[in-house]
Image: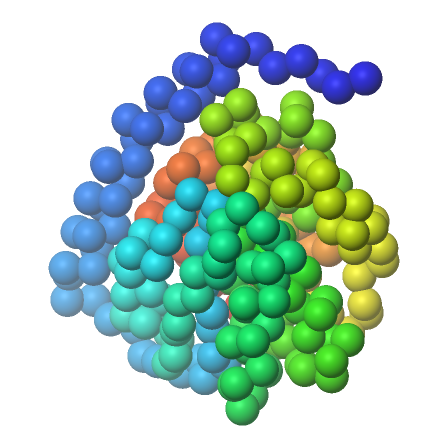
Amino acid sequence: MEKRRNPLTDGLHLWTETFALPITKIRLQSELASNRKEPQTDSVPTILIPGALGSENDLKLTKEWFLKLGGLKQVDIVNPLPKDKVLKQVEHLVSVIKNYKNPVRLVGFSLGGLVAYLAALECLERGIAVERVIAVDSPLLPITKSDFNHWATLYSVNDLLKDKRINNLLLGKKPDSLRLISLYTPNSGIINPDVSRRKDADSFQLPTQSHMSIYYDINVLNSIKNVFHN
């Protein structure tokens, strides 16, 4: 039986996150405006993938941070479409990945992490190497309606609930050749952390409880940076 969500609690979480988001973004902009810069020593091409409600524009500051303070030489943003069809997004992302000369590192945020993982599985089937997948507060196991806050049942979530092919892929064992890292928020009220932690993935708790701020939270970005090579 599905656990029923509390609309009052969900609403409080959503209000808190919406209030915190601009503050987090301002802090990131302030850090980017400083003179501090890290040497760009990491040559692995890195693709950032936004979530169901995100866009390429949402990740521009994130990309700038990784180039200036994350040590990366190449960062690209891919916003797979259409937003309401997960497997179509996977096809879109795979079509981009296959054009890279070297194995790519995929960093997916929220539902973008699930798309990144499924795309990596498809790439391996086609003989295309992926350096690793980093899923940031993403569902990596089959979900129910109770695993998401009610506002998120729009867009791709409905597709996840209905498509048995997706659930079968998520229930399958991860290939040993694929490195999967899951970074999750413990109690954001947006997504159930239980669907973010796979037994065959390396899972680490993020130093935040805000799902909506994962693009801009400096502590989250540093957590992502810390798993680039470990």
The number of numbered discs placed on residues in the rendered structure image is 0
Position of residue 77 measured from the top left corner of the image (x, y, whole percent):
40, 66
* Residue 140 shown left or right of residue 70 in the figure: right
Position of residue 40 measured from the top left corner of the image (x, y, whole percent):
35, 80
**Camera-side residue: 124 or 32?**
124
Is 33 located above or below residue 13 in the figure? below
Determine the residue positioned at 69% across, 37% down: 161
**Camera-side residue: 143 or 34?**
143
Is 3 located above or below residue 172 in the figure? above
Position of residue 20 measured from the top left corner of the image (x, y, whole percent):
30, 31
* Residue 185 shown left or right of residue 193 in the figure: left
Is residue 8 something that shows in the picture? Answer: yes
Position of residue 57 measured from the top left corner of the image (x, y, whole percent):
29, 56
Determine the residue positioned at 44% across, 21% down: 13
Q: How is the image coloured?
A: rainbow
Quarter of the image with the C terminus is bottom right
Is residue 135 something that shows in the picture? Answer: no
Residue 12 found in image quarter: top left
Determine the residue positioned at 56% across, 43% down: 156
Quarter of the image with the N terminus is top right
Is 28 located above or below residue 48 in the figure? above
Determine the residue positioned at 64% across, 42% down: 159
* Residue 136 shown left or right of residue 180 in the figure: left
